[in-house]
C-alpha cells in the first residue's frame, strides 16, 4: 500500500508527464521541496521548459497562483504591492502585489535588478511582507518557484548570497536525449500548442489532505544521531574546503535534512539514510557555495567541490 508521500509523488509525476517530458528527476525534486515546505530555483539555458515546468507544477497545487515576469525595470512595489489613498473613505488601502499568493512563479528572476530581487527576502524567509511600516502575513503554504538563466547570459544580474540561501534547492535542467526531444516536437510543433491552456485545465490538482499527510509522514521520519552528525560534518567540511570562499550556512544544513526526510518519505521508508543526504547534496548545496576566485579561474565547478567534500567526510554505518 502506498504512503501519502508516495501517492503525492506518483500523482504529480503522472500529471506533469502529460505536459513536460524527460524531467523525472526535476519532478522528484519539486515534490521533495513541496513536502519540505521550501522554495525552488530552476536554472537552465533558454528554451528547456523551465517556465512550462514551473507553471504546470504550480497549477497542480491548491490555492492562489500568481506570476511575475522579471525585467530590468521591475520595481519592488510591483512585487509587494502599494498603499493608495481613498478619498471616499479618507484612508489608505492596500493594493496587494502578486507576492500575496500560495504559489508564486518568479520567471527569469535574475533579469530583475538587485533592489527588486531583495523585495522577496522577507517573504521567502518569514512568510511576511512589510509595506510602508505595516507587516502583512502571507498564506501558510507560501512557495516561490523561480526560474533563471545562467548568470553569464546577457541582461542578467547574479542573485545575492542571502537570497540564494533562501532557496531550499536548485534544479538544473540540461539538454535531453534525441528520443525525448522527438516527443516534444510531436507534442508541441503545431501552432498554439505551447502552453496550451486546455491541457493545463485537464491537470488534476493535488488534494490538500494528501499533502498534509505527506508532510506529517516526513516529520515522523526517524533520524539517527550518526546521520545528523554526517550532515553536520558535510556542512563543516564545506566551510574549510580550500576551493570554497563561503560554505553552506546553518540554514543550508537544515535544508539538507528537511529534503532528506522528504526523500525518505517518498521512498516509503521510515528512517533517513546517508544515501538520502548524499543524493541531495548537489541540489541543496551547489547554489550556496561561493568558490574562491582562484577556483573560478581554474574552471572548478561547485559539483566537483561537493564530490570532493563527500569523499572526505566519513559515511556512518547504517
Image (spheres, rainbow, N blue to C red):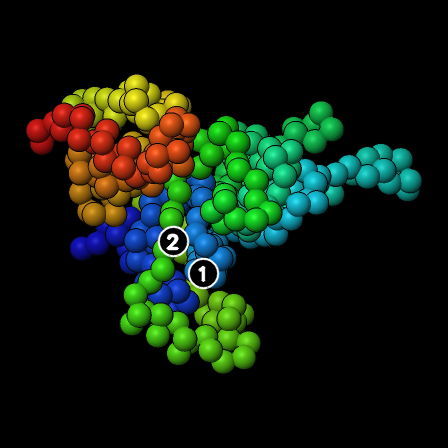
Image side of residue 106 versus residue 42, left or right: right
Q: Residue at x 45, y 44 (%)?
A: 41
Please tell me whether mark 1 sits on a helix, a strand or a loop.
loop
Q: Earlier in the sequence, mark 1 or mark 2?
A: 1
- Above/below status of 254 relative to 174: above
Does the rendering let one see residue 202?
Answer: yes
Q: Quadrant of the C terminus?
A: top left
Q: Position of residue 155 (x, y in %)?
A: 60, 47
- Name the residue carrying label 1: 49
Q: Position of residue 289 (x, y in %)?
A: 38, 30
Graded by Cα atoms within 10 Å as few (under 14), some (14 to 19) or many (20 or more), the crowding at tag 1 reads some
Graded by Cα atoms within 10 Å as few (under 14), some (14 to 19) or many (20 or more), the crowding at tag 2 reads some
- Name the residue carrying label 2: 173
Does the rendering let one see residue 60?
Answer: no
**How far apart are the two marked residues, 1 and 2, measured between alpha carbons?**
9 Å
- Above/below status of 186 relative to 40: below
Q: Residue at x 57, y 49 (%)?
A: 154
Image side of residue 244 versus residue 220, left or right: right
Q: Position of residue 196 (x, y in %)?
A: 52, 71
Image side of residue 254 versus residue 150, left or right: left
Q: Which mark is residue 103?
A: none
Amino acid at each position: 500500500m502506498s504512503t501519502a508521500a508516495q501517492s503525492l509523488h506518483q500523482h504529480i509525476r503522472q500529471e506533469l508527464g502529460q505536459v513536460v517530458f524527460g524531467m523525472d528527476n526535476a519532478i522528484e525534486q519539486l515534490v521533495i521541496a513541496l513536502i519540505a515546505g521550501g522554495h525552488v530555483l530552476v536554472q537552465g539555458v533558454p528554451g528547456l521548459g523551465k517556465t512550462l515546468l514551473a507553471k504546470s507544477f504550480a497549477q497542480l497545487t491548491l490555492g492562489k497562483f500568481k506570476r511575475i515576469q522579471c525585467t530590468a525595470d521591475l520595481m519592488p512595489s510591483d512585487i509587494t504591492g502599494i498603499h493608495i489613498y481613498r478619498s471616499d473613505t479618507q484612508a489608505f488601502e492596500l493594493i496587494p502585489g502578486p507576492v500575496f499568493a500560495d504559489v508564486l512563479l518568479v520567471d527569469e528572476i535574475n533579469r530583475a535588478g538587485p533592489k527588486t530581487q531583495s523585495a522577496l527576502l522577507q517573504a521567502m524567509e518569514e512568510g511576511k511582507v512589510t509595506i510602508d511600516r505595516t507587516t502583512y502575513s502571507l498564506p501558510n503554504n507560501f512557495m516561490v518557484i523561480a526560474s533563471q538563466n545562467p548568470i553569464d547570459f546577457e541582461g542578467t544580474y547574479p542573485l545575492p548570497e542571502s537570497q540564494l540561501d533562501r532557496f531550499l534547492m536548485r534544479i538544473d535542467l540540461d539538454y535531453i536525449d534525441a528520443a525525448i526531444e522527438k516527443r516534444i516536437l510531436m507534442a508541441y510543433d503545431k501552432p498554439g500548442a505551447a502552453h496550451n491552456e486546455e491541457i493545463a485545465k485537464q491537470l488534476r490538482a493535488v488534494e490538500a489532505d494528501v499533502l498534509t499527510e505527506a508532510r506529517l509522514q516526513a516529520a515522523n521520519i526517524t533520524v539517527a544521531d550518526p546521520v545528523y552528525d554526517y550532515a553536520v560534518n558535510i556542512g563543516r567540511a564545506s566551510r574549510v574546503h580550500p576551493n570554497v570562499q563561503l560554505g553552506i550556512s546553518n540554514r543550508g544544513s537544515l535544508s539538507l535534512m528537511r529534503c532528506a526526510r522528504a526523500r525518505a518519505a517518498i521512498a516509503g521508508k521510515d528512517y533517513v539514510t546517508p544515501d538520502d543526504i548524499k543524493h541531495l547534496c548537489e541540489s541543496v548545496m551547489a547554489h550556496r557555495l561561493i568558490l574562491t576566485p582562484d577556483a573560478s579561474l581554474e574552471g572548478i565547478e561547485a559539483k566537483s567541490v561537493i564530490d570532493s567534500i563527500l569523499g572526505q567526510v566519513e559515511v556512518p554505518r547504517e
